[in-house]
Image (cartoon, rainbow, N blue to C red):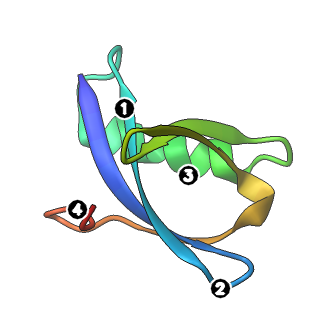
């Protein structure tokens, strides 16, 4: 199961840390490739978690995504 924590900067300037996981993927590298591919599509959306809440992140509202070796701080 691949899981990563991403720091997302939105177009409005706000930042948020989200957790994204996919049980069927084996590596974090594949997961990150999927995140980039999904968010680059016009109708791309990711189902993520922000704390205990489910969040849908739409690619058109994202300005940048950071992935750090230790992940973002939740």
Q: In the figure, residue 10 lies in which quadrant?
A: bottom right
Q: What percent of the width, then of the height, locates residue 36?
A: 56, 51
Near-viewer residue (47 or 41): 47
Q: Residues within 10 Å of mark 2 (few under 14, many from 20)?
A: few
Q: What percent of the width, then of the height, locates residue 46?
A: 60, 39
Q: In the figure, residue 23 lies in which quadrant?
A: top left
44 lies above or below 59: above
Q: Residues within 10 Å of mark 1 (few under 14, many from 20)?
A: some
Check if mark 4's residue and mark 3's residue have beta carbons within 8 Å: no
Q: Earlier in the sequence, mark 4 or mark 3?
A: 3
Q: Secondary structure at mark 1?
A: strand
Q: Nearer the viewer, mark 4 or mark 3?
A: 4
- Indicate which disc residue 36 carries: 3
Query: What residue do we see at 48% from left, 40% from top?
Result: 53
Q: Secondary structure at mark 4?
A: loop
Residue occupied by mark 4: 71
Q: How far apart are the alpha carbons under marks 4 and 3?
A: 16 Å
Residue occupied by mark 2: 13
Q: How far apart are the alpha carbons under marks 4 and 2?
A: 20 Å
Q: How far apart are the alpha carbons under marks 1 and 2?
A: 25 Å
Q: Earlier in the sequence, mark 4 or mark 2?
A: 2
């Amino acid at each position: 199961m691949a899981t990563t924590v991403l720091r997302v900067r939105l177009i409005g300037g706000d930042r948020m840390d989200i957790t994204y996981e996919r049980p069927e993927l084996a590596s974090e590298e594949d997961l990150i490739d999927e995140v980039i591919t999904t968010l680059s599509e016009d109708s791309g959306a990711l189902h993520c978690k922000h704390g205990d809440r489910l969040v849908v992140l739409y690619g058109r509202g994202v300005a940048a995504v950071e992935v750090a070796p230790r992940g973002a701080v939740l």
